Image (spheres, rainbow, N blue to C red):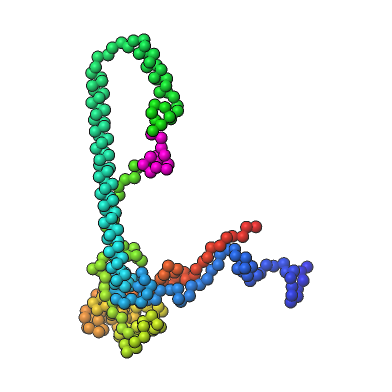
């Protein structure tokens, strides 16, 4: 029987709290922790720099970028494509040259075989027969160093002499530039300028230091990660999804300019998402540590 007392040290059950405490102190097992607010990207921050946008633009899928950062990304990808295209053309020329050389060798071998077959056949002398026999005996050697093969041995230290050297084929690079977040085709002309409405335009405090930076220009509600937002394509104004559902979608008219809208003119703005978590889902980080072997 186990002893039941306040300072019991002979318990038969290894409780969950004791196991969790021992695992944390031992340095083994997996640590799980819910990611806090500071680890999730704010709705008005660039998806590349993770900082508040100075000149915000949005893609058709609703991903927000700083114009300078996304244009720099597009230019970098175009330069990378140009470099890969030059390498592809160079490799393609070398393949064509190799094919032409191989064809010329085959053609020359056919000519040589034809010339040799047209020569008259003579009876070999005994000395020639002995020499041919000795040559065939030496050629039948299983050593890979005989018959001049010592210079053709593969070398794993020289790239040109590796067994798989020359097997790579030229592959034409893809000229399409993809969005770094959604991996959908991206063009600079498809970027839409975004217009945020400041909560207090007279306040000269830096945007990074403000907790509530922007508001909906129609309902005057403060915008944050907990409030779903949408961008109106014609003007770039950011409004709440509640305003879209209750006011805009009734008549499909822009509430600020009275302009007729279409379904594609309302772009839901994507929220959250960093290298640690996606939007409002799986907000839990895990640290893999060595497992305790019994």
Q: Is residue 293 left or right of residue 92?
A: right
Which of the image's four quarters has the C terminus? Answer: bottom right
Q: Which residue occupies the foreground of this view, 18 or 281?
A: 18
Expressed as whole percent of the image width and height from the top left, the position of residue 16 reads 63, 69
Tell me the residue at 36%/69% (across/down): 48
Tell me the residue at 45%/73% (across/down): 39
**Does residue 100 show up magenta in the picture?**
no
Q: Is residue 96 left or right of residue 41?
A: left
Expressed as whole percent of the image width and height from the top left, the position of residue 96 reads 25, 42
Q: Is residue 282 left or right of residue 115?
A: right
Give the farthest residue toward the left: 259
Residue 283 vs 293, above or below: the answer is: below
Tell me the residue at 31%/65% (across/down): 73
Q: Residue 272, located in which quarter of the rendered image?
A: bottom left
- Magenta part, dominant SS: loop
Tell me the residue at 45%/68% (across/down): 276
Count of residue discs? 0
Q: Residue 67, located in which quarter of the rendered image?
A: bottom left
Expressed as whole percent of the image width and height from the top left, the position of residue 277 reads 44, 69
Magenta part of the chain: 152-163
Expressed as whole percent of the image width and height from the top left, the position of residue 18 reads 65, 70
Residue 62 visible in rendering:
no
Q: Residue 25, located in which quarter of the rendered image?
A: bottom right
Q: Which residue occupies the foreground of this view, 84 or 287?
A: 84
Which of the image's four quarters has the N terminus? Answer: bottom right
């Amino acid at each position: 029987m186990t002893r039941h007392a306040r300072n019991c040290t002979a318990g038969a059950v290894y409780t969950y709290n004791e196991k969790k405490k021992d695992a944390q102190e031992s340095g083994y097992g997996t640590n799980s922790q819910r990611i806090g607010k500071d680890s999730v990207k704010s709705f008005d921050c660039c998806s590349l720099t993770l900082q508040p946008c100075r000149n915000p633009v949005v893609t058709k899928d609703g991903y927000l970028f700083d114009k300078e950062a996304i244009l720099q990304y597009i230019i970098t990808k175009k330069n990378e494509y140009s470099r890969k295209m030059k390498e592809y053309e160079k490799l393609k020329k070398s393949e064509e040259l190799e094919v032409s050389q191989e064809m010329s060798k085959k053609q020359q071998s056919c000519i040589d075989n034809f010339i040799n077959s047209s020569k008259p056949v003579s009876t070999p002398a005994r000395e020639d027969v002995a020499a041919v026999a000795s040559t065939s005996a030496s050629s039948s050697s299983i050593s890979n160093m005989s018959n001049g093969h010592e210079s053709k041995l593969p070398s794993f230290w020289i790239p040109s002499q590796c067994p798989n050297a020359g097997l790579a084929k030229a592959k034409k690079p893809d000229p399409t530039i993809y969005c770094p977040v959604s991996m959908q085709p991206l063009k600079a002309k498809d970027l839409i300028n975004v217009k945020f409405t400041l909560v207090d335009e007279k306040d000269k405090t830096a945007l990074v230091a403000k907790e509530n930076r922007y508001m909906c220009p129609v309902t005057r509600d403060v915008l944050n990660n907990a409030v779903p937002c949408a961008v109106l394509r014609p003007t770039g104004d950011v409004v709440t999804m509640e305003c879209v559902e209750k006011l805009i979608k009734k008549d499909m008219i822009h509430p600020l300019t009275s302009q007729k809208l279409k379904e594609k003119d309302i772009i839901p703005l994507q929220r959250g998402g960093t290298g640690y978590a996606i939007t409002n889902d799986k907000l839990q980080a895990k640290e893999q540590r060595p497992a305790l072997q019994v």
